[in-house]
């Protein structure tokens, strides 16, 4: 059973503003979220058994994929697609929306991204959302790492800030997206200290040396069992991600450097992430 914990749906310009696409192009590549929903559906499940589909409420960044849109999309295959909603912590209706997306829409987790939402992860607006997520038993998938988007500050993006969040809300399930790139050490330190904090490996295959180093660090700190499989589809496919993960095992970078046991990578690919996050069948 392969679970992709991190996929996106949405279109330009309906959900993703031109300025976001522009900034992506400057820094990286064309944002290709296009294609029909049928094509998206086929692609998201190609090579995996289940896929988590993320809403995102980040108007400051120009990236708004509504909860209703994700709920409607997930309804086409509720056995295989899993919907995570999103709220903008700065919105006065954020807490009401959390309850609505869970009870009315059946969304089972929440995607947040303080740097995209231009919010301080240790400020009152963000912390009240964390408090509600813990109370509602909704896991949080959080983009706590850098981005090309200039909506917020890198000071809001450091994974180390989540240590304080996990101390205050010890039963909240947290997934640090992209292993907190490029601050892998910080993400790993937080994952190691807190029972319910995990990290996903999505989008890391484009930088093979960084991926290798991130995995070696996770193994040396003995937290590789808390790494979850994810792709960041449609930016990366499951096949690319699985091939990329396998490509850094063994003595991929020569016999002088630490060797990643292929079993570690296979365990990441097969990780029962939904169970770990308390999400039932
Ligand atoms: Zn993503």
Image: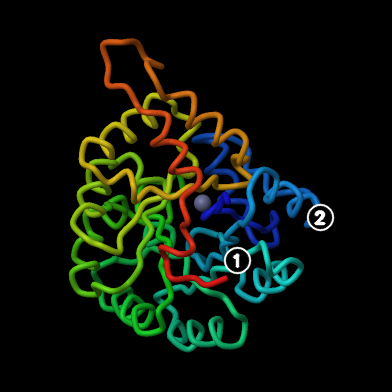
Where residue 14 appears, as percent x and y from the top left, is 70, 62
Label 1, secondary structure: give it.
strand
Q: Quadrant of residue 278?
A: bottom left
The residue positioned 29% from the left and 66% from the top of the image is 121
Q: Nearer the viewer, residue 94 or 169?
A: 169
Q: Which residue is mark 1?
A: 82
Up-down relation of residue 145 to residue 273 (above or below): above
Where residue 77 appears, as percent x and y from the top left, is 73, 66
Q: Is mark 1 within 8 Å of ligand 1?
A: no
Up-down relation of residue 259 to residue 269 (above or below): above
Q: How is the image coloured?
A: rainbow
Q: Nearer the viewer, residue 143 or 3?
A: 3
The residue positioned 60% from the left and 42% from the top of the image is 235
Q: Of discs 2 and 1, which sits in the foreground?
A: 1
Which quadrant is the C terminus positioned in? bottom right
Q: Which residue is mark 2?
A: 38
The residue carrying pointer 2 sits among few (fewer than 14), some (14 to 19) or many (20 or more) residues within 10 Å by Cα, namely few
Q: Earlier in the sequence, mark 2 or mark 1?
A: 2
Work out which residue is located at the far top of the displayed protein and give it. 255
The residue positioned 58% from the left and 53% from the top of the image is 7
Q: Quadrant of residue 201?
A: top left
The residue carrying pointer 1 sits among few (fewer than 14), some (14 to 19) or many (20 or more) residues within 10 Å by Cα, namely many
Q: Is mark 2 within 8 Å of ligand 1?
A: no
Is there CB contact under 8 Å for labels 2 and 1? no
Q: What mark, if any, has residue 201 been given in the picture?
A: none
Judged left or right of residue 254, residue 271 is right
Where residue 226 appears, as percent x and y from the top left, is 34, 51
Label 2, secondary structure: give it.
helix
Q: How many marks?
A: 2
Q: Nearer the viewer, residue 89 or 68?
A: 68
The residue positioned 56% from the left and 60% from the top of the image is 63
């Amino acid at each position: 059973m392969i679970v992709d914990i991190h996929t996106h749906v949405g279109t330009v310009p309906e959900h993703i503003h031109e300025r976001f696409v522009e900034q992506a192009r400057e820094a990286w590549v064309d944002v290709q979220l296009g294609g029909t929903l049928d094509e998206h559906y086929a692609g998201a499940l190609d090579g995996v058994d289940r896929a988590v589909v993320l809403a995102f409420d980040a108007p400051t960044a120009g990236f708004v994929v509504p909860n209703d849109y994700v709920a409607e999309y997930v309804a086409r295959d509720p056995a295989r697609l899993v919907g995570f909603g999103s709220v903008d912590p700065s919105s006065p209706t954020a807490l009401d929306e959390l309850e609505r997306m869970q009870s009315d829409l059946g969304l089972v987790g929440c995607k947040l991204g303080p740097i995209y939402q231009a919010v301080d992860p240790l400020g009152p607006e963000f912390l009240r959302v964390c408090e509600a997520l813990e109370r509602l038993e909704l896991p949080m998938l959080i983009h706590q790492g850098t981005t090309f988007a200039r909506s917020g500050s890198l000071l809001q993006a450091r994974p180390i800030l989540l240590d304080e969040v996990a101390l205050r809300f010890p039963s909240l399930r947290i997934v640090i997206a992209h292993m907190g790139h490029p601050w892998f050490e910080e993400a790993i330190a937080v994952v190691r200290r807190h029972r319910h904090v995990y990290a996903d490996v999505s989008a890391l295959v484009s930088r093979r040396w960084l991926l290798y180093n991130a995995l070696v660090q996770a193994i040396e700190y003995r937290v590789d069992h808390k790494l979850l499989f994810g792709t960041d589809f449609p930016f990366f496919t499951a096949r690319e991600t699985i091939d990329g993960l396998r490509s850094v095992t063994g003595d991929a970078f020569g016999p002088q450097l630490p060797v990643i046991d292929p079993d570690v990578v296979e365990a990441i690919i097969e990780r029962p992430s939904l169970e770990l996050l308390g999400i039932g069948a």
